[in-house]
């Protein structure tokens, strides 16, 4: 069996850092984007040691995700575990870093580590699609 893999994704998001951070931490906002397709259920206990639950749904498919917040540094950094049927027996780790660029937009860096090698590529595609949905949602927010 191969060892764990990491994926990294960078995006320029058309919104201020504090607004992007809100979209990562508030259930009503997570429901708008935290699935590559379909709809989302979200529950959040935003505190270090707090847990979250994300349910991605499309048609008859339901994928449950849970995790624990390890670091919360508003509005610049969020670190949490990520557990689903597709990430193996041990939790994987997601780190999100947000930084303002010169135009007022947000440079977003996502690192998802400790993934089983067999699912790294699908998680890269999934996160890519979700971050596209995040950026599209934020682009619709009145300035």
Image (cartoon, rainbow, N blue to C red):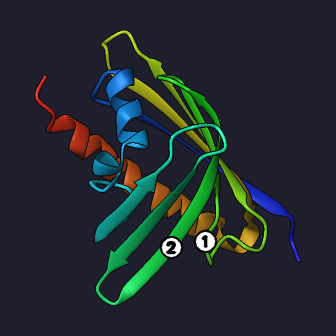
Does 103 appear above or below 4? above
- Disc sitting over residue 139 in the figure: none
Query: Which secondary structure lies at badge 2?
Result: strand
> Could you tell me which residue is drawn at 64 percent across and 51 percent down?
68
> Could you tell me which residue is drawn at 28 percent across and 68 percent down?
39
* Circles 2 and 1: CB atoms closer than 8 Å: yes
Does 122 appear above or below 107? below
Does 85 appear above or below 76? below
- 30 on left or right of 86: left
Residue 106 spot, x, y in % from top left: 39, 24
Quarter-of-image position of residue 43: bottom left
Q: Residues within 10 Å of mark 2 (few under 14, many from 20)?
A: some
* Quarter that holds the N terminus: bottom right
* Residue receiving disc 1: 84
> Could you tell me which residue is drawn at 23 percent across and 45 percent down?
136
Residue 31 spot, x, y in % from top left: 30, 56
Which residue is farthest top? 102
* Residue receiving disc 2: 64
Does 24 appear above or below 90? above
* Pick the front one: 126 or 61: 61
> Could you tell me which residue is drawn at 42 percent across and 16 percent down?
100
- 83 on left or right of 98: right
Residue 83 spot, x, y in % from top left: 64, 65
Real-space Cα separation, disc 2 to disc 1, in angstroms: 6 Å
Q: Residues within 10 Å of mark 1 (few under 14, many from 20)?
A: some
Query: Which secondary structure lies at badge 1?
Result: loop
Counting residues from the N terminus, which is met first, the one under dot 2 or under dot 1?
2
């Amino acid at each position: 069996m191969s060892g764990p893999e990491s994926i990294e994704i960078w995006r320029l998001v058309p919104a201020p850092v504090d607004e992007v951070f809100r979209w990562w931490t508030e259930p009503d906002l997570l429901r708008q984007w935290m699935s590559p397709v379909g709809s989302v259920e979200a529950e959040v206990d935003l505190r270090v040691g707090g847990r979250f639950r994300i349910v991605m749904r499309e048609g008859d498919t339901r994928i449950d995700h849970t995790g624990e917040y390890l670091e919360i540094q508003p509005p610049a950094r969020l670190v949490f575990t990520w557990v689903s049927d597709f990430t193996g027996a041990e939790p994987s780790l997601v780190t999100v870093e947000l930084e303002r660029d010169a135009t007022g937009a947000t440079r977003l860096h996502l690192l998802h580590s400790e993934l089983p090698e067999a699912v790294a590529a699908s998680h890269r595609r999934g996160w890519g699609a979700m971050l596209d949905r995040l950026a599209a949602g934020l682009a619709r927010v009145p300035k």
